[in-house]
Image: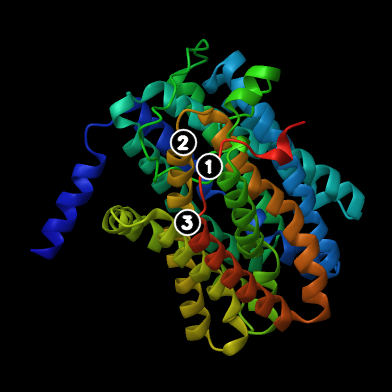
Amino acid sequence: MIFRSLFRAYRNAYSGLPREVWMLAIALFVNRVGTMVLPFLTLYMTDELGFDEISAGKMLSIYGLGSIAGCYLGGRFAKRFGAIRTQFFFLVGSVPFYLLIPFLGAWWSIALAVLFMAFFADGVRPASATALAQFAPAELRLRSFGLQRMAVNLGISFGPAMGGLLSTLNFFWLFIVDGGTTLICAMYLMYVFGFRAPQKIKELPTSQAIAGIDTSLNSISIQHNSKKWFASSPLRNRRFCVFLLLQLLTAIVFTQVHTTYPLYLRHHYGLSNPWIGFLFAINTVVIVAVEMLLLHRVSQMPLLRVIAFGAGLSCLGFGMLPWGNSLGFAIASALVMTFGEMLWMPLAAGWVVNENKGLDQALSMGWYTVTYSLAAVIAPIGFGYIYQLSAEWAWHLSAAIGVIAAFGFLCLEKFPNSKACPAVQT
């Protein structure tokens, strides 16, 4: 009876979506199945090439810089040349850099290749979400973005697990498989959609709280139109400015999942690459299985309170790492940060949409997603230095930041909404 009810709930959530939305979800799944390079990049730099943690962390910051540029231009290209064409261009453009990196040895040459790899790889995200907005009717967009997030996480649940196994054979295969699946995804999009002409982009309805939007919705580029830009800018809202700062703090902690986290699992817990990949898989499998049902349960609760709890819980998952040294404890820590992520990330996107009604929604989501890109630049260097001095203190600091962020989100609930943020009146 319970399983029948669960089946009915999932069927109702995803039935009736357009065929094109499902095709885009399949493309995302194929692309994410090959996501192997980024989760193991720090281990590749340290174990295979002999670089220290700080140098490996800087490489992740280089990736973040490329991601910011790719997300911005990917959104602009999608509006000018069409979302499908843009995806194909960026997907094919990233393949040579996946294949080139394992043949490089100098830090500067790898950094240059990683910069361009990130530019093309993350430039796909804006075009993908733009295509989804074009193909999904307004009344189905919320569920369509939910399907997109599920496809992304389902694919990622396979990628790192397979990457862990392949890395035991040779790190070289991580880059080959990642590049291969990226090329397959590009060919699939061309076969299903062809080179469709640009379509008029439908605006997302501001009345919807898009709780299911993936944080990869770097898709909505930031437009700058002088007076009109400032008149509708969400940065005029003081509460939104504070929210962005709290988001940045929490995202800096969470970004360690691709930097110091796998290093600590190797050095402190003694886990092999396949087991590290297994922990990544636990995160995404739980998200796929539980997130939509969990969000439905908390949808009527005050958003900022749930976001505060989720942000604190996510940081606690990292902060509790020094408390144990067994595989079971590492799994428990991964589950804590996963449940925190499910309560924090998607609901934060929904709060942003609701908070800035009447202002530029594209700018709202643009500034929101910029916090994740900035975190990808700051975290590898900042926590990389701290980790090299004391790995345990890196996790203690993560827990402390979680407490600060959670308290800040709770206080923000009583902070008045203002449409005049002096810091940006320039």
Q: Which residue is drawn at 41% across and 37% down?
A: 25
> Mark 3 = which residue?
414
Q: Which of marks 2 and 3 is in front?
A: 3
Quarter occupied by residue 284: bottom left
What is the spatial separation of the Cα atoms under label 3 and label 1, in whole angstroms?
A: 42 Å
Quarter occupied by residue 80: top right
Under circle 1, the secondary element is: helix
Specify the amino acid type for callout 1: Asn
- Residue at the top extreme? 197
Q: Which residue is drawn at 59% across and 33% down?
A: 124
Is there any visible trace of residue 155 in the rendered image? no
As drawn, the label of residue 31 is 1
As drawn, the label of residue 274 is none
Q: Do the residues labelled 3 and 1 touch (CB within 8 Å)?
A: no
Q: Do the residues labelled 2 and 1 touch (CB within 8 Å)?
A: yes
Specify the amino acid type for callout 3: Lys
As drawn, the label of residue 27 is 2
Under circle 3, the secondary element is: loop
Q: Which residue is drawn at 70% across and 53% down?
A: 376
What is the spatial separation of the Cα atoms under label 2 and label 3, in whole angstroms?
A: 42 Å
Specify the amino acid type for callout 2: Ala
Q: Quadrant of the C terminus?
A: top right
Q: Colour mode? A: rainbow
The crowding category of the residue bearing disc 3, from other C-alpha atoms within 10 Å (few below 14, some 14 to 19, many at least 20), is: few
Residue 72 in the image: above or below residue 393: above
- Could you say where residue 151 lies in the image, as x and y percent from the top left? 41, 45
Q: Earlier in the sequence, mark 3 or mark 1?
A: 1
